[in-house]
Amino acid sequence: MIKLSEFLPPRPTTAWRLIRQVGVDNVVGVLNGGEQDQRMFASVGSAGWEIEDREEVPWSLPALRRNKELYEQWGFSLIATEDTAPMDRIRLGHDGRDQQIDQIIEQIRALGALGVPTFAYNWMALSSWGRTDVALEDRGGALVTGYDQAVAQSGPALMAAGEVTADEMWSALEYFLRAVVPEAETAGVRLAMHPDDPPQSVDRGVPRIMSSVAGFRRMLDIVPSDHNGMTFCQGNFALMPEVLGGETSIPSLIREFGTSKIPFVHFRDVRGTPASFRETFHDAGQTDMAACIEAYHAIGFDGAMRPDHVPTLEGESNDAPGYETLGRLFAVGYIRGLEHSAYGHPSTRHC
């Protein structure tokens, strides 16, 4: 069945107990002290915990084991990680990429040793997911994030145009996959490439090559393997040209890629285009979310699925746009209801 999960920092926060109370016992984790963790940890409050000053690097086996054990003390199972050792030299094909690949391999081997089956990563060099507004008013005054391409691209360049080409980034990706996929196969860990967010061909001078369905088909063909897969982030795929143009749909893509290529799902939705869009409540976007769950059921999906980029609701600070607590609780209930409708209530399942 679907492994309904939540994205939690590796040290307890005030949200952990609430997440357990609504029935989520699987975690998609980040690295303690990594970039993702620092953003989340600073925003949501630590409930008395501090980031430890330890000699081992965050992606090492001892550090990841400590994270896993702490999640387990709270009743969570760590089933995926969505934070990585540094990768920009790898993505850009720069000197030093072999050393960074060695660090990624160390992280993959550690996950394998701990029985964590999924390693999510992305190919967005020099930046992460981009938004130009984090407080757009939505239903009942809830706040959502949004993106205006004209505003975003008027900002400072990340690098000079043409300094690195899309072809060079494709070459760098092939170099990476040929080095890492065999290691993932040996470790029993499935790689899950996240789409560019937003899906656009360039971001302030840096090429973006994971911004179309065609790009994902190409990536998967470089090293065919069940361990070379994707993070199927529905909000990003919903903005890709093949979906917006009517060539395909999110449920059709779920059926096309199947469980062999989708180990991990971000269940979220948007309204708009890559040039101008906003996040939405899970029941108010442009995608038929019930049809998506039916498609996951049809392919026998049993991997990690988590809500993502939720609205900020009344009484919340919006210090962590997209990751406050009340919107997550709404999303978890919404997903669980769709899951029971498609997969059946737990009491009727015969798995």
Image (cartoon, helix red, strand yellow):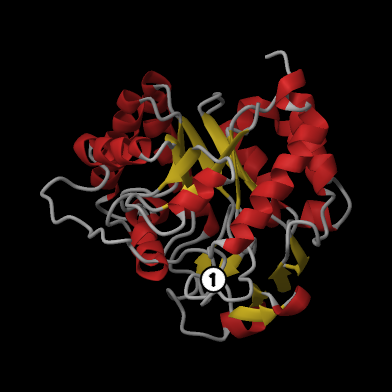
Where residue 206 appears, as percent x and y from the top left, is 49, 67
Task: Identify which residue is drawn at 58% across, 76% down.
Answer: 315
Residue 168, placed above or below residue 145: above
The part of the image, by quadrant, that contains residue 150 is: bottom right
Q: Is residue 339 visible in the rendered structure shown here? A: yes
Front position in the image: 222 or 344: 344
Classify residue 292 as left or right of residue 100: right
Image point (41%, 39%), residue name: 175
- In front here: 292 or 326? 326
Residue under the point 36% across and 35% down: 72
Residue pictured at 81% horizontal, 62% vertical = 284
Q: Is residue 78 above or below residue 90?
A: above
Looking at the rendered structure, the kind of residue marked 1 is Pro
Q: Quadrant of residue 292?
A: top right
Q: Quadrant of residue 309?
A: bottom right
Q: Is residue 48 above or below residue 267?
A: below
